[in-house]
Image (cartoon, rainbow, N blue to C red):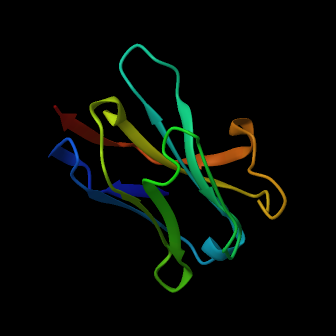
Amino acid sequence: QLVESGGGLVQAGGSLRLSCVAEGRTFSAYCMGWFRQAPGMEREFVAAIARSGPRTYYADSVKGRFTIFRDDAKNTVYLQMNSLKPEDTAVYYCAASFATGWGKPPRTSEYSYWGQGTQVTVSS
């Protein structure tokens, strides 16, 4: 089970840090990803971090503004979001994949577990 937290309402230019805690003892074995879905839009990839880190991947739209990192001792993956824009408004989901992520990010279909999502709203 994956549980996200940290969403909320923030003004453009502000920052938020999302957290995703995973139950179980095999967290370090997963490649972890963040996705988002805005109203009326398809779910899209945001960022991923390989099994045991440190390899990371980002969507072009968030590169340089968002940082994904993980703390395997706490079974937690984070998404630090800076310089937020209104177009970042969406429900953000974390997901876990058995793929290593060492050479490339997993395809969306390769994520086996998903959280329930946390709302991020950026006002202009």
Q: Is 92 rendered above or below residue 29?
A: above
Residue 52 % position (x, y): 68, 76
Q: Is residue 70 left or right of residue 97?
A: left
Q: Is residue 17 left or right of residue 36?
A: left
Q: Nearer the viewer, residue 23 or 47?
A: 47
User: In this rendering, is residue 75 above or below 62?
Assistant: below
Q: Residue at x 44, y 55 (%)?
A: 66
Q: Can you tell which quarter of the image residue 91 is in?
A: top left
The x, y position of residue 30, in whole percent, is: 68, 65
Where 56 falls versus 13 (above or below)? Answer: below
* Numbered-mark total: 0
Q: Quadrant of residue 98?
A: bottom right
Give the farthest residue toward the bottom. 73
Q: Which quadrant of the rendered structure holds the C terminus?
A: top left
**66 relative position to 48: left or right:** left
* 57 left or right, relative to 93: right
- Most extreme residue toward the right, as rendered? 103
Residue at 46% in and 81% down: 74
Q: Quadrant of residue 50?
A: bottom right
**Nearer to us in this view, 15 or 79:** 15
